[in-house]
Image (cartoon, helix red, strand yellow):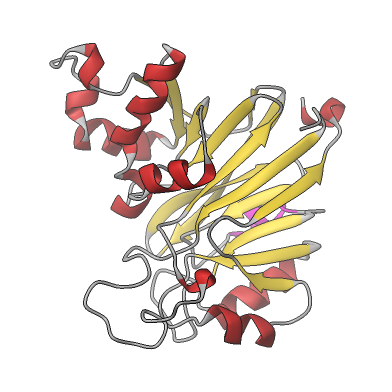
């Protein structure tokens, strides 16, 4: 991969249950179409030799094996809900390869929950070889990492504040149903937007697909893909019904964006 190419891989495009849903007999959950097989939400940014993970989804091990991921250099958390966090222990495999701790970034509140929920990792009560080696780094503004600028985008997920992230011409905005005006100003001139679009019917903490389409058109990225999809969404059917420039995400989907390293610093 060229040093000026930012590669984005959608590791998981599904909602908190994953698709198929346990015990469900609907047509989507019984579909054999690969785009209707959805692990929990996460994405990977690859730049040069570095891999930045957004969220450690419950299905991280499965996703890493499927995409042949050998290294993780940093993790950025959107929030602390289980489907975005509870694959954290699988980071241990990457520690064993790199022999280095992995920095975790997120809001102060999110990382406080990470520390409290997984105290065995951070209280040093277990032998180092048994637990992930992780470092907590709260962020509330842009940081530079591996010659990239990562900018938190504050959003609302019901009453909970979550972070999206912008990196150059790319933004990842999952788990939200409100993007404040101050955050919208951070989303100009995007080439690719990944945006929460749970289902067609209303939800009290997620954009539904009509709302997501309206928000995508307001942001005006050249291309938008909707993620965190429930089993109400039949990919091969509903993808064709979306406006031009807006599509449904799927597991393993990849994008390559050309970036100018000089403006990423």
Nearer to me, 254 or 57: 254
**Rendered residue at 61%/48% (across/down):** 9
**Rendered residue at 86%/33% (across/down):** 260
Q: Can you say whether 116 is above or below 204 in the image?
A: above
Q: Is residue 135 left or right of residue 237?
A: left
Q: Is residue 214 left or right of residue 32?
A: right
| Residue 146: quarter of image | top right
Asked if residue 4 shows in the view, the reply is yes
Locate residue 169, reporting x and y percent: 77, 46
Locate residue 178, reporting x and y percent: 52, 65
Magenta run includes residue 48: no
Q: Where does the magenta region start and end?
A: 180-187
Residue sticking out furthest to the left: 125
Locate residue 253, reporting x and y percent: 62, 57
Q: Can you say whether 198 is above or below 13 in the image?
A: below
Q: Quadrant of the N terminus?
A: top right
**Rendered residue at 65%/65% (across/down):** 225
Nearer to me, 194 or 187: 194
């Amino acid at each position: 991969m060229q040093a000026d190419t930012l590669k984005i891989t959608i590791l998981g495009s599904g909602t908190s249950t994953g698709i198929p849903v346990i015990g469900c007999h609907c047509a989507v959950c019984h579909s054999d179409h690969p785009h209707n097989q959805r692990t929990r939400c996460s994405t990977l940014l690859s730049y040069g030799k570095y891999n930045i993970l957004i969220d450690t989804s419950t299905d991280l091990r499965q996703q890493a094996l499927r995409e042949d991921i050998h290294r993780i250099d940093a993790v950025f958390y959107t929030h602390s809900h289980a489907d975005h966090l509870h694959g954290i222990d699988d980071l241990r495999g990457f520690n064993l390869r790199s022999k280095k701790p992995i920095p975790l970034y997120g809001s102060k509140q999110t990382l406080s929950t990470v520390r409290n929920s997984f105290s065995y990792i951070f209280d040093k009560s277990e032998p180092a070889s048994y637990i992930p080696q992780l470092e907590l780094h709260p962020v509330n503004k842009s940081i530079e990492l591996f010659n990239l600028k990562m900018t938190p985008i504050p959003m609302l997920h019901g009453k909970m504040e979550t972070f999206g992230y912008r990196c150059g011409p790319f933004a990842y905005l999952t788990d939200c149903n409100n993007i404040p005006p101050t955050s919208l100003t951070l989303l100009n001139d995007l080439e690719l937007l990944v945006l929460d679009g749970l289902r067609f019917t209303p939800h009290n903490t997620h954009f539904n697909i009509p709302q997501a389409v309206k928000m995508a058109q307001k942001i005006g990225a050249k291309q938008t893909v909707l993620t965190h999809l429930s089993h109400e969404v039949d990919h091969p059917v509903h993808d064709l019904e979306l406006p031009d420039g807006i599509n449904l995400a799927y597991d393993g989907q990849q994008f390559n964006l050309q970036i100018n390293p000089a403006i990423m610093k």
